[in-house]
């Protein structure tokens, strides 16, 4: 059974996500990009409220930005995007070293379905690194969250970049390799319903549980509850 990961930007949003039944609370700042880093004090404040109730993860920006510091608090997971790393193979060694050290909190490997637009390593490259470290976690997300994309769609989703059978196969290969996987990428109710047979470990959302479906707006507990019920079946 999948759980619902909800990305929040404040303590108030974290409380709304908890009220709605989120299984995992993720901290990020959507104004800073797909995996935008929130201020460390924001991360710590949310962890203080949430950590005894749910696991907490934090998005820490893009690896290529050069800020690799991990907030000093009781996180369960942390992750970096790999935009801009397509021509720099050092990410593979550096992130592989973090995985090999069994770091706590645990590194989540993030792959972008629109990797060519993001100038990131391909999904297959990131997946291969995850498979080399059984017990690791993979996030499949999208980098582009607005109309500035080759598809010329106002809000492209994961399914605009990758077909459902391919995603289902990736999830099956992840299970076989002992890799847990979260599916993200502007997913809404329709996309989640279509992807339920893929059986990921988590569905990750933000915009779908915000007022008016706007990822920059505030999270609404009732919207979280609707999707949490859906992913739990």
Image: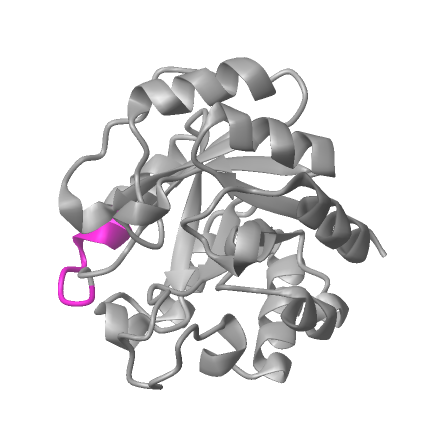
Q: Is residue 212 left or right of residue 165?
A: left
Residue 206: give x, y in percent of width and height.
Answer: 52, 51
Toward the front, the furthest residue is: 212
Residue 179: give x, y in percent of width and height.
Answer: 58, 52
In this rendered view, identify the residue nearer to me: 148 or 125.
148
Q: Is residue 43 above or below residue 65?
A: above
Q: How many marks?
A: 0
Residue 73: give x, y in percent of width and height.
Answer: 42, 15
Report the span colored magenta.
Answer: 86-93
Residue at image point 81% right, 50% down: 229
Q: Is residue 222 above or below residue 52?
A: below
Q: Is residue 180 visible?
A: no
Q: How is the image coloured?
A: one colour
Q: Is residue 134 visible?
A: yes
Residue at image point 37% right, 23% down: 42
Considering the image in quadrants, where does the C terminus appear? bottom right
Q: Is residue 19 magenta?
A: no
Quarter assignment of residue 168: bottom right
Residue at image point 73% right, 69% down: 193
Q: Is residue 162 left or right of residue 208?
A: left
Q: Is residue 88 magenta?
A: yes
Residue 105: give x, y in percent of width and height.
Answer: 45, 27
Q: Is residue 20 left or right of residue 128?
A: right
In this rendered view, identify the residue nearer to me: 82 or 130.
82
Residue at image point 29% right, 52% down: 33
In this rendered view, identify the residue nearer to me: 128 or 156.
156
């Amino acid at each position: 059974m999948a759980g619902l990961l909800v990305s929040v930007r404040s303590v108030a949003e974290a409380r709304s996500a908890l009220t709605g039944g989120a299984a995992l609370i993720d901290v990020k700042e959507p104004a800073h990009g797909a995996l935008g880093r929130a201020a460390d004090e924001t991360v710590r404040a949310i962890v203080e409220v949430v950590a005894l109730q749910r696991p907490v993860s934090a998005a820490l920006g893009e690896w290529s930005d050069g800020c690799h510091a991990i907030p000093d608090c009781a996180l369960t997971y942390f992750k970096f995007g790999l935009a801009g790393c397509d021509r720099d193979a050092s990410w593979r060694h550096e992130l592989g070293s973090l995985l090999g050290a069994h770091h706590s909190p645990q590194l989540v490997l993030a792959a972008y379905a629109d990797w060519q637009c993001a100038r990131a390593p391909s999904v297959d490259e990131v997946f291969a690194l995850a498979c080399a470290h059984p017990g690791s976690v993979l996030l499949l997300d999208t980098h582009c969250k607005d109309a500035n994309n080759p598809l010329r769609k106002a809000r492209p989703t994961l399914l605009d970049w990758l077909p459902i059978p391919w995603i289902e196969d990736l999830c099956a290969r992840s299970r076989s390799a002992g890799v847990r996987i979260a599916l993200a990428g502007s997913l809404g109710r329709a996309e989640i319903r279509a992807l339920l047979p893929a059986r990921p470990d988590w569905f990750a959302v933000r915009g779908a549980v915000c007022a008016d479906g706007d990822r920059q707006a505030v999270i609404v507990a009732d919207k979280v509850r609707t999707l949490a019920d859906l992913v739990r079946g």
